[in-house]
Structure formats: C-alpha cells, structure tokens
Amino acid sequence: MKTKSIIDRIGWPRLIIGLFFFLLIIVSPIMGLNLTDVFSDVLRRWAMFGILVLAMVPGVQSGIGLNFGISLGIVAGLIGGTTAIEINYRRGGEYQPWADLGLALLIAIPIAIILGYVYGLLLNRVKGSEMTVSTYVGFSAIALSNIVWLVLPFGSGTLVWPIAGEGMRNTISLEQSFGGIMSNPSVTAQQPFPLNLLAFEVGGVVVPIGTILFVLFVCFLMWLFLRSKWGIAMSAAGENELFTRSNAINVDKMRILGTVISTVLGAVGIIIYAQVFGFLQLYNAPLMMSFACVAAILIGGASTRRAGISNVIIGTLLFQGILTTSLPVIKQLMPQGSTLSEVIRIIISNGIILYALSKTRGGTQVES
Amino acid sequence: MKAKNDMNQSNGSQDELVLLQQETMRQKVFSWLFENKVMLLFLIICIGGVWVSGNSAGFVVENVAVRFGRNAFTVMSLLIPVLAGLGLNFSIVIGAIAAQVGLFFAVDWGFSGIIGMLIAFLIATPLASLFGFGVGRLFNKMKGSEMIAGLILGYFADGLYQLFFLYILGGVLPVRTTSLIIPGGIGIKNTIDLTGNMKYALDGVKLVDIVMIFFIIVAVVCAFRIITKIRNKDKSLLKDVIILLVAALVYGLSYVPQIESALMTNSLSLLNVLVIGTVGVIVYAVAKLIGNWRNADSKFKKARYVAIIIAAIVVYALTYIPELEKVLMTSKVPALPLALIAGLSLFNAAFLSTRIGQNMRTVGQSRVIANASGINVDRVRILAMIISTVLASWGQLIYLQNLGTFATYGAHLQVGQFAIAALLVGGASVSKATNKQAITGVLLFHTLFIVAPEAGKVLFNNAMIGEYFRVFVSYGVIALALAMHAWQRKKKPAVEMPA
C-alpha cells in the first residue's frame, strides 16, 4: 500500500523516466564513455533550457494552461538578439559582449510585453480552448517571423547572407557577441577578474556556473513572485475562476499578467539559450521548441493546472539529461543509430504531453 | 403562441410586409457575405496573386487540376469527425502512416501497378481501422480537447513511425528488396522512387474499367438487396430491378465500338468535367421541378432551380470562348481519382440521411442530448474516427501514386496541416464543414500555393517571401478558425441567457 502511494505521488512517467536516466548514467562508464563529458553536457543543456521551461509556470498557474504560444516570446528574444548585433555593427563593431547581452534583453523584453499583452487579450476570449489556439498562434508567429527575418534592413556581415546582401542567415554565430560569456570557459577566461569565474572546469566537468546561477536567480524571483500578493491572486485565478472573481480579483487581468510574464520569460530564455549555444537560430528552428519546454515541465511532475519551480528544475534535468546521455550510449550500441536519440525525443516529449492531456479530464475544457 | 405571432404578422399592412421582405433580402446578402468571409477573403487574395504573379491562366488551371486530383480526397476525409463534434481531425496523419506502411510493403514485395495498389490498400485499410479505433478510444478519454490531442498524437505517431522505418525494418524485420535499405546501414531510405511500379497506378485506370467496376458494385449491392427482400417477403422489388437493369444497360453501352474507343482514355479534360457537371446539374434541377409539378409543395422555391439551370447554361456557354476552351482542353484530371472524389462526396452527403449519420449529427450537437436519447456516444465517436482514418489512408495512397516519389519520412508530416488549412480556407469551421467547402477550399488553397512564390518575387523581389507567406497562411488560417470558434462558443451562452 505504502509503495503505491509513493508511486502515485511521484507519478509513473516521472518514475520510469527517472529510472531510465539513472540507468543511462550507470551504463555510460561501463560502456567506456567519459562520464565527465556526460555531466558537462547535462549541466550545459540544463542551463540552456532552464528559463524557457520556467516560462511555462506563470502560464499554467494563471490558468491559460501549457503555453505552446511561448514562440511569441522566442521571436521577441530573437529580434532583440539580432537587433543588438546590428546596433553594435553600426557603432563600429567592437567586441562588447555584455553591452550586447544587455541591449538584447532591453529590446526583447518590451516587445515581449506588448506581444504577451495582445496574446493575453486573445486567450481571454478563447477560454477553454487555450492550448489548441496557442499551439497554432505559436506556429503562425514562427511562420510570420520567417518573413520578418527576410525583410529586416540589417547590414551586419554576421547577420545577413554574404552574397545576396539581404535576408538573415539561418544560424547566426555569437562568437563576436555574447556567445558563451556565462558558460564557456575559453570565452570567460578572456574577461577581467570576477567575470572570468562565470564558467570553469573541475576535473574535466565544465560548469557554466554563471548561467546556472542566473537561471536559479530567475527561478528564485519567480518563487518570490508566486508568494507575493499578485502571485497568489494569479494562481487563484488559475485554480478556481468563480471563487477568485467572488473575491473581487479581476481574473482576466491576472490571466493577462501570467501570459505577459510567460512571454517575457520566453524572450529572456531564448537569449540565454543562444548565449550558451553560441548561435542564434532563426526561421523554422524554434518551431517545435515550445513542445520541448512543455514536455520538460510535465516530466517534472506538473499538470496542465498546477506547476511549480521544483517541476522546472527536476523536469529540465530529467528530460535534457535523458536526451544528452542516451545519444553517446546509443552511438556505442549501434553505430548506425545516429538519429535514434532524436526519435526518442519525439516519442518521449509527445507521449508525456498526451499522457498529461488524458489526465485532465473535464478540467479547463468546457463541454460544447 | 407561435401561431398567434404568425397571424399578427400576416395581418400587418401591405407596406410593412414589402419593407420587411426587402430587409430580409438585404440581410440575406449580408449574412451570406458574413458567413463566407474567409472564403471570399481568400478568393480575393488568390485573384490578386494570380494577377500579380503574371502566371498564365493555363498554367494555374492546369496545376490546380493536378493538385485537386491529388489532395481533395484527403481533405474530404475530415468531414465526418466535424459532423460528430470531434472538430478538425489533426490525427489523419495516422491514416497517412497506415497508407505508407501498406505502400511500402507492396513495393517491397515487388508488386506493381494496380495489383500493387490493391495490396497496399488491403494492408492499409485494416491497419487504418485499427488505428482509428485506438484514436477514437483515446479521444473518448479526452472529450473537449480532441484537437490538441490529435495534433500531439500525430507527432507521437510520427516518432513511432520513424522508429519502425529506421530501426525495426531491416533491423528486426527482414526487408526483401535490399535496394530500399540505406546503403551500409539499417532502416529504409529517405525517398522511395515509385516510377515504374506504383506511379500513376490509379491515375492510369481507363474509363472503361471504371464503368465496369461501377457496374459490378451496383450489381452486387442490388443483388444483395433483392435477395434480402425476397427472404423478407417484401414486394417492392421493382426499384432495385430497374436500377440493376439501368446499370447493366450502361455497362452494355460501353461495348459499342464508338463509345468504347471514347472511354479508352484515363483522364478527363476539364472541359469534359465541366460539361458533365453542367448537364448533371441541369438534369437534377429539372428532375426537382418535375417532381414539384407532379407533387406540389408550398415551400418549394421554383425560382432557385430555374436560376440554377440558367447559371449552368451560362457556364456551359462560357466554355465556347476560344481562350477558355483552350485552357480547359489542356488541363486534365485523372479519371479514377476524380470518380473516387465524386464517390466520397456522394457518400458524405448520403451518410447524413442514414440512421448512424443522424446519430452522429446528434452527438455532434450535444453529447448530453444524444446520451439521453439512447445513443451510445462513445461508440459513435469511435466509428467517426475509424471512417475518417480509413478515408485519410486512401487519400494518402491517391496522393503518393500521383506524386510518384514516396518521401519515407516526410510525406505524412504535413498531411493534417495542409488538409485542414484547405478545408478552412473553403469557409468551413470547427463545427461545420461541407463537401462544397472542401472542394472550394482545395481549389483556393492550391491556387495560392502555386502563385505565391511568383507573386512574392514580383511584389518584394524575393520568391522566398511568397514561400513563407503561403506557409504563414496555412498556419494562420487554422489559428484564426480555432480562435473564432472558441470565441463564438464562449459568447453563445451569454446571448442565449435572457431567452
């Protein structure tokens, strides 16, 4: 009986995935793989996705459900990143990583606030079908941004195609900008004293401590916010709309607040992602990114109605951990299976979303 | 109470009545415009696109005709789930997957032509039924979120499909034709060329054979009905016997040398399709008029059918304009897919009048009422999913044999996306979709697809903008339709409250 209640609390999917992850870590050294590389990769991927996954929390808490429309925030972040590089180029193009990063955030966040607000207005009109609508709003946002990347009048050589002279590249290197300044030891080594400690190597394991601390700091801010007056009101709006309304809280306003925060975190998240990754990926690269974030927080134990900081931290670790550790193991086991890891990603991420949807019977969805 | 109101109205003064009628006429036009706003918007975009792109009308019509034969069947497979209240069936991807498994084995076992297609069909149909059953069961657990579940399910199924084709086939299950396997590895190649075995297997079927198949189907159905009626001692045999005789007569006619040589072709030019269409419409309208003349009905709108006949005659007369005639002569639609599309639209229409179709409509309108009136809601929904999945798998077979190359890992990915976008462009919504909307939608959506790159080049000096624009349209129109549906659903109770 007792084991059953424990399993119920952890949840079957999380248990299976957790055990699988554990198994992979044990198997890796036996198969002659370098465990330090595996740990480095897991830490790196966790830092990359941390804030993007955190962006799910305000969405779920405010009642709009799993925010597949985080793509809007991602687009805002990408606009911020590219514009920062362009401004740097017009001013002479010196290597100023911190100014670039700050500028990118400064441009991205207001855009994300505006987009998030409009998106929140839309979501208030489609209560009950937010997830379906938000998925396609996300897809449309990416499709529309494709046109934006083609027409933005940018001139920087790192941004645009060299021969055509117009239209931005698919992948933009951040080597001359903010790439790796909080995560790559070889980049941070060139920085002055306190900044060179933002990433280091211990016994072969690369620790992107700057990014990790940043992610944890943002998580902490979110934790504080959820315990503030506004945060509690927002969570209440997501939990029980009628009850909240009877307490003179404007539910629609709270939902917009949640959407805006989620979108802003999406924008910040993609900039941090690019910082660790070293590249900005435009066009259709972020099309399915929201699915990875949704899957990660669900693996962390969140439902479509409830999500917390611990779900983010555990979920990102398990989901990204499995993906990074399984790749070398699979390569060792079957040399031809280079894409098997990708196939596993598709199956796990969509399987967990389906599982979560099947658990929310009669939840936010209204009977037609 | 209601009768009293009607009395009051009819007692009103003559002037008021005339005014009222004018109002309703104007309201009618406006409400028609409002109902068809999406379709009209795309009609304008398409016309603008064709005009801007500078493509010749012949080029556009020819390509749209090809794409119509290729895609319309799949789009029509979406209609029944909409009827049953399951919304837009994003999981038709799973039907496409079933078709591709069937087609792969048919190719692997070395079959070709119509026999190969038949093998693929025989594998795909039970597989799709099984999948449809599973999807239906799953959707019954997630009532209200079928669309998002269907979308995710499509991606999930794609993962399993990749696992099957990349690692299980060739790895665990043996593959006979080694040329299909990735050189030096396991798993199936990226593209399978169907030229020489399955390409045009259905498109190449001649009209004579279609007539024969049609006759056999009608004969079997009629014979079955006659036998059951004789068993039940039912006396009304005449109708079935007449249908059987007419079918036999038509079949017999195909042996007349002149007719036979005319039927030896495998594709119809648009001109022929148009002539058949207009004649069909005129016959239908005249039959209605005669029926009314014999058995008068006060609600019968004579003017409507007369207008239909006149419109059909005008369309027919237009085909005599030399330029138009030339375009219509050169554009061809393969006969069998066209017949199948026509058959499916008849099926969709006829299905509504059957008992199970009526049950499905009731379930679609309100599950609570359906349940209260003794309909097994869950079973009806599962049936709708099975039908849709099976039809989608057939649609995918038609698509692949026409395309001639089978992109192993890509052919099914966008099926749901594009089919649903096409249906919505035609003016359908999440809760209502008709054959007419499906056909209009396919025509408009593919016109846009053909002209968008050229139009982008002319307008922005960049063909990629046109490309991205059409992708944006396919996502955007779905987002718009879903949002509008949710919006209306939310608004409805507030409007009905005072009553």
Image: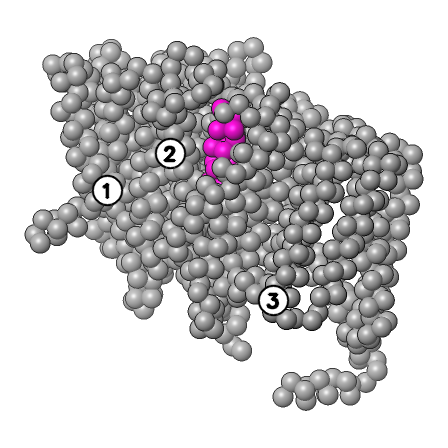
Q: Is residue A94 above or below residue A17?
A: above
Nearer to us: label 3 or label 1: 3
Secondary structure category for the residue under label 2: helix
Q: Main secondary structure of the magenta part?
A: helix
Image location of residue B57, percent across then percent down: 79, 32
Spatial CA distance of label 3 from label 1 is 57 Å
Image location of residue B210, percent across then percent down: 72, 40
Q: Is residue A165 left or right of residue A22?
A: right
Q: What residue is drawn where x is 60% and y is 69%?
A: B232
| Residue receiving disc 2 | B160
Q: Is residue B216 left or right of residue B327?
A: left
Tag 3: residue type? Arg
- Residue at the far left: name it: A2
**Is residue B181 visible to us here?**
yes
Q: What residue is drawn where x is 42% and y is 57%?
A: B144
- Quarter of the image that includes the N terminus of chain B: bottom right
Q: Residues within 10 Å of mark 1 (few under 14, many from 20)?
A: some
Q: Is residue B175 above or below residue B22?
A: above
Q: Which mark is residue A13?
A: 1
Segment tinted magenta in the rendering: B90-108
Earlier residue among tags 3 and 2: 2
Image location of residue B372, percent across then percent down: 44, 73
- Chain under callout 2: B
| Residue receiving disc 3 | B231
Queried whether the magenta region covers residue A179, the answer comes back as no
Q: Mark 3 and 1 residues: CB-CB less than 8 Å, in contact?
A: no
Which of B57 and B359 lies nearest the eye of the viewer? Answer: B359
Queried whether the magenta region covers residue B103, the answer comes back as yes
Image quadrant where residue A367 sits: bottom left
Q: Residues within 10 Å of mark 2 (few under 14, many from 20)?
A: some
Q: What residue is drawn where x is 86% and y is 40%?
A: B256
